[in-house]
Amino acid sequence: MERKFSVAKEGFIEDFNNHEVTQEIESQNSALYGLLGFDREKNPDPVGKVRDVLRGEVVLIGSRLGRAQAEKKIEYKFSVRVPTESIKKASPMNWESGVSWVYAVEKDGGISGFSRFLYGFFDKKKGSRSKRGLQVKGTVRGSEYKGQPYLSELIRKMVSALR
């Protein structure tokens, strides 16, 4: 099971690295990077912190259930621990206290200010932390942020590979 988990976890990390959300944030030139308001100076690698948690803290836990006497078998139960609190701590949206960008990306309406977000290149003098967008006083669009599957989808895929 440990070998199977190792392969599944490796695939999970690869899927995380190749996911469009991860790619957009790492490019630092996307609308999503701007919408999330990352500050290149204060947080130059927001995805790297999450990746470190996933590599180090997603673990397989096994326990022996007992021995089936008639069949001369030993039963084990396995589970995967995904450290949601560590992920939240590694992925703060600095401008929205207590909110994780990893989980906000997945939730409809999870990123506030979407209707007032103006994408483009702006420098810090104009008030842009990310240099990729501004929050304007008026409404730019009449809709709210629509969440998209991200980490929870990747976790489900990894767990399915273990069944």
Image (cartoon, grey):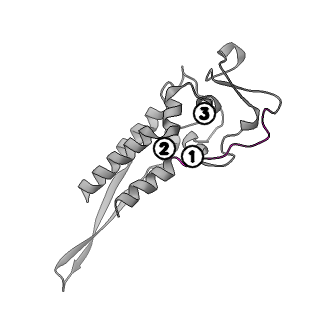
Q: Is residue 51 visible?
A: yes
Does 127 sit left or right of 80 as displayed?
A: right
Q: Residue type at mark 1?
A: Tyr
Residue 142 within the magenta-colored segment of the rendering? yes
The image shows residue 100, relative to residue 132, as above or below, that is below
Which is in the foreground here, disc 1 or disc 3?
A: 3
CA separation, marks 2 and 1?
A: 9 Å
Q: State yes or no: discs 2 and 1 in contact (Cβ < 8 Å).
A: yes
Element carrying mark 2:
helix
Q: Residue type at mark 3?
A: Leu
Kindly give the residue lying farthest to the left in the view shown.
72
Marks 3 and 2, the one that precedes in the sequence: 3
Q: Residue type at mark 2?
A: Ile
Quarter of the image where the N terminus is located:
bottom left
Kindly give the residue lying farthest to the top in the view shown.
125
The image shows residue 132, relative to residue 23, as above or below, that is above
Does 163 sit left or right of 102 as displayed?
A: left
Residue to which mark 3 is pinned:
32
The x, y position of residue 49, in whole percent, is 45, 34
Residue to which mark 2 is pinned:
87
Which residue is painted at 59% across and 43% down in the image?
Answer: 105
Which is in the foreground here, disc 2 or disc 1?
A: 1
Query: In the rendered image, which quarter is residue 139 located in?
Result: top right
